[in-house]
Structure formats: structure tokens, C-alpha cells
Amino acid sequence: MPKITENIKTIPMLDLKAQHEPLNEEIKTAVREILDSSRFILGPNVSSFEQEVAAYHNVAGAVGLGSGTDALYLALRALDIKEGDEVITTPFTFFATAEAITYVGATPVFVDIDRQTLNIDPLKIEEKITSKTKAIIVVHLFGQPAEMDEIMSIAGKHGLKVIEDSAQAFGAKYKGRPVAGIGDAGCFSFYPSKNLGAYGDGGMLITNNPEISEKVKLLRNHGTTGPYQHSFIGYNSRLDEIQAAILRIKFKHIDTYNSKRRDIAALYTSLIGNAVACPVEKQDRVHVYHQYTFRTPVRAAVEKALHDNHISAVVYYPIPLHLQVAFNYLGYKPGDLPEAEAAAGEVLSIPIYPELEPEDVKMIAGVILKALQK
């Protein structure tokens, strides 16, 4: 007899197909129009998307780029951060944050995180400032706005530039202001898994300083100031016209997407908040939950239970940056940044995306609670 296999439902970390389906025809139309026009590089969709994002964030300018990593790198270039300089940042973030610092020859200086928010702890920044410190890269991790008032005050006191790594925080707000538009420059990633994701790589820099945006526009296109005229060494990092068109369509829905993420997060917290350390959202913040990340000292058991039940769960991030092999040359050792190291041993991210059904959220929560009872 043929073997009968049970139809087991799998719940992924996100479901890009579910988000695409209602936008399918609109996206196909937009792509066909671009194919018909043959304007593939720095076309009208890139320009329009830049204007729309700048208006959304109430800033002077936005520049479409090839990736979020490029946005960080070109922000540092535009702010004249160079070899021999130091840039303060968090060790608990994706590798690109610190990687971009090394691209300009500067040295990452890691400051420990706040236990509740998992963002850089502003109370620990000043002790790491030296005569070589030129900037701070703030990360709004998982969509949680960092303590921008305190950070901007420290930066002003010491004459430092502030770059906001907002790759995971499109639409998040700090005291009523969209993040990324508070510091000297803000950087977004449009990697497909982001709250506002393209169908490939993409990024953007926004700023209230026209000099910065104009310099980044030159930098992204080989330093070109005129036909075959190059005033300085630039880079090749242009947001693709097709990706810009797709992003413009999805951008119209970003507030709805984020609202649904917040509803799902609230449901998770109501269900498991007494059993694990859930994300904390301060009263004057709008967290957009790129990830729903909780903490538990028995993470391995919970993670196994979820995987056994065909539910995705991922550790973001298992090794803080100061302990990555690539940064051995900086001389950090275990115990130097205890909060980041503790978080790396306890955090677990579970599925969250706008199309996730409440019944699935309840089922996921049930698996977590059952695992904790063992």
C-alpha cells in the first residue's frame, strides 16, 4: 500500500508570497511599463520614491542606493569619516553595521546594550569617546527606536555625527518623529524580509542636510559631476528602477503592515508575557516589530519545541560583533560587554508578518508555554 503522509502545516518566519498576492497585478503592470520604457537606471520611479520617502520622514532629501550596507558606507563617506577615526556603535546588531565602518578605514568601538530594549545604552557611550571618535551609528534594533534624545545630546556635546541604522525600523517613531530623520543621516535596507522589502537588494539614505544628500548622489554614481567627469572616487550603488517601482507600490501599505505587526506583537505579549521576557515598548515610541524577539534562559528547549512543531524560530544574534572572528584584531574578549553577551545567549525570534493569522499566533504561543512547563 502507498504510504499516507500527513499534511503538516509549516509556519515560516515570514510569508512573502502572502504579501505579494494582493499586489500581483499592480506590480506586473508597473514592471511591464518599465520594460516598455527601457528606462532601467535612475528612472522616474527612483526619483518619485525618493521624494515620497523624504516627505514621509519630513526630511530634505532621500537617495536610493543598492543596499542598506551601501547606505551606511556612503553615509560615512559623506560625513568624511576616514582611516584613523573611531565610530561608536552597538555590538548587538547585524554584521553590516560595523562592517561599513571598516570600509572607510575607521575603527568600530562597541558600547554595551540596554537589557530591556537591546539597543545601545546611552549611559555607557561617553566613557568610550576619545579624541579619535567622530561618529555614532545608532541601530533601531528589531524596529525598536533607540534613546535618541540622550544620544543626540551626547553627540552635540562632543561634536560627533550621528547615523541611524534604521534597516529594521521603517515607519518606527520616537516621540512622534519617524526614526532615521533625527540624526545627520538615516539608512534603510529594502532587503526582501524587511518591513518594506523589495524583490531583491535595495537601500536608501535620508537626511535633512542637502549637502549630504547631494554628495551621496554623486558617490552612488562613480563620483560623476558631468558626462564622463569625475571629481572624486565614487562608488556604484544605484537603486534599481524595477525595485523602486515595486517599493512604491508596497510603500502605500507600510503603515497598515506595521499596524498589523504591532497587533500580532500585542497578542504574543498577552499570551506569553508571564512566561518569558517580551519586547518592551516605551510609552513615547512606536515599535514596528521587524522581529518579535523574547528572552528566556531555556532558549534551546523552546527553540526545539517550535521546530518540532514545524514553526520557524531564529536566533538574532548568536554571537555579538565584538566576539566575531572578523573583529579579533580589535582585542575584545568574553566578558567585556556582558549585556550583549547575555542577550546573545537568551534571545529567540518567532514568526511575525502582517498576514500571520491570530489562530497561528495562539498556536505558537501554546507551543512555547508547553515547552516552558517541562
Image: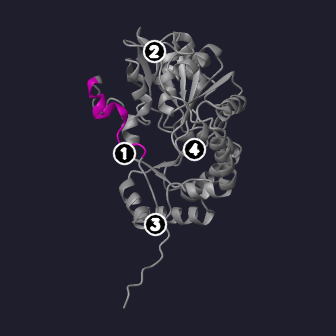
The secondary structure type at the circle numbered 1 is: loop
* Cα separation between marks 4 and 1: 29 Å
- Residue under numbered circle 2: 233
* Cα separation between marks 3 and 1: 21 Å
Q: Of marks 3 and 2, which one's residue comes earlier in the chain?
A: 2
* Cα separation between marks 4 and 2: 30 Å
x%, y% of residue 355?
A: 62, 58
Q: Of marks 4 and 2, which one's residue comes earlier in the chain?
A: 4
Q: Amino acid at mark 3?
A: Lys
**Residue mark closest to the camera, 3 vs 2:** 2
- Residue under numbered circle 1: 345
* Cα separation between marks 3 and 4: 34 Å
Left or right: residue 95 versus residue 174 is left
Seen in the picture, residue 296 relative to 4 is either above or below; the reply is above
x%, y% of residue 353?
A: 58, 53
Residue most toward the bottom? Answer: 1
Badge 3: residue crowd in 10 Å (few <14, some 14–19, many ≥20): few
* Cα separation between marks 3 and 2: 58 Å
> Which residue: 59% across, 44% down?
195
Q: Does the magenta segment cover residue 317?
A: yes
Badge 4: residue crowd in 10 Å (few <14, some 14–19, many ≥20): many
- Residue under numbered circle 3: 370
Which mark, residue 197? 4
Badge 2: residue crowd in 10 Å (few <14, some 14–19, many ≥20): few
**Residue mark closest to the camera, 1 vs 2:** 2
x%, y% of residue 374?
A: 39, 66
